[in-house]
Image: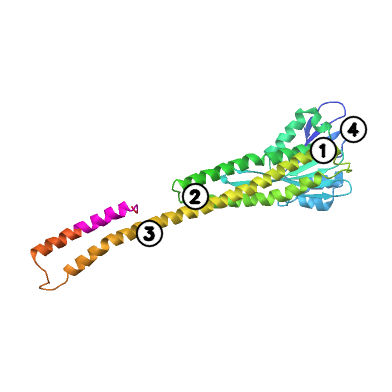
Amino acid sequence: MFKVIDLPPEGKPEETEGLDRVCPPPAGTIRWIDLVETDKAALDVLGQRFGFHPLALEDCASFELQSKLEEYDNFLFIVLHTITADPDDPSDVQIHEVHAFLTETTLVTVHDNRIDAQELAWRRALTDETFLRHGPDWALHRTADVMVDAIFPLLEAIADELEEVEDSIVRGGAGGDLARIFQIKRSLVKMRRVIRPLRDVIGILTRRQGDPRIRERTAVYFRDVHDHTLRCAETIEEDLALASHAMDAYRSAISNRTNEVVKRLTIVSAIFLPLMFLTGFWGQNFTTLPFSTDAVFYVMLGTMLALPVGMYLWFKGRGLL
């Protein structure tokens, strides 16, 4: 489905749907075209009416690309990404991809599903007359800005979850802590694979001086987006380090609990060792044993009672219990 926002030289932004305005705009008009759920027919329309290169249109048919910027004769082709939490699995993340064609008068965005960040920029273009007045490159900048900013709440949520896991480990841990740590690390690695090329693309856009499609004013504002992308990348690395520390803490907690169990079993064995000797000696299957008198028998019983009590008190006094 095509949606179009037109900003004429005089007047307010106007939104329409359909194919009628999917073409270069009249002189003085700034146009933003948005296409959701692409198909071959829709891409063919873009190719016929704008002359977009077949290779760029071929890239638009799939949504598993890295962020990139490609320059053609009459347009720039840019792939941007944002990341959100998976609504079906809060411990996982979803990668959203936007393909953009940028000319001096038109911005065409293509994506395969609804993206909240991109929708926010679209609504802003409809309500703020100055949004598109700065040019289609400004609309691209604002779209990239909100897409990058949408990642920060997710990173904060991941950091909070890591702190909860660490607290759980310190309090004694649970069997699910290890699985949570592995899931968080997988999500962070997935995010890192997206953010690194996105950071490079935004960096290139800050250095497009002299390109009529990226005005100098917009390039300056892309620097702010680049700074935000760098912060995302740094935060991801910090969260990965926290996840590794949580893993080490989990292993240390398991090792300490194992050592504690082994220590207690050793103490129990030490207490019962003399008892095993006594019962083994006096339980020999002979008719007559040395010292087999009633007095010795009672001494043996007293010893069997006194030894474990004495050893228990000795171990407790040494702080081993």
- Numbered mark located on residue 82 in the image: none
Above or below for 14 versus 103: above
From the image, tell me which residue sits under label 4. Answer: 28
The circle on residue 262 is 3
Which callout, 1 or 4, points at the residue further toward the start of the chain?
4
Residue furthest out toward the right: 27
Q: Position of residue 29 (x, y in %)?
A: 87, 33
Badge 1 element: helix
Relative image position of residue 307 (x, y in whole percent): 22, 58
Label 4 – label 3 distance at C-alpha: 81 Å
Q: Residue 189: image x %, image y %?
A: 63, 52
Circle 1 residue: 218
First in sequence: mark 2 vs mark 3: 2
Left or right for 200, reference 287:
right
What segment carries the magenta color? Answer: 305-319
Q: Quadrant of the N terminus?
A: top right
Question: Amino acid type of disc 3?
Answer: Val
Mark 3 surroundings within 10 Å by alpha-carbon count, few (fewer than 14), some (14 through 19), many (20 or more): few
Q: Is residue 224 above or below residue 268?
A: above
Residue 285: percent from left, percent from top: 15, 72
Q: Earlier in the sequence, mark 1 or mark 2?
A: 2
The residue at the point 76 percent across, 47 percent down is 79
Q: Element type at marker 4?
A: loop
Query: Which secondary structure is most common in the magenta stretch?
Result: helix
Label 1 vs label 4, nearer the camera: 1
Q: Which residue is identified by label 2?
A: 177
Circle 1 packing at 10 Å, graded few (<14), some (14-19), many (20+), is many
Asked which secondary structure carries label 2, the reply is helix
Q: Circle 3 — which element?
A: helix
Q: Residue at x 82, y 38 (%)?
A: 218
Q: Nearer the viewer, mark 4 or mark 3?
A: 3
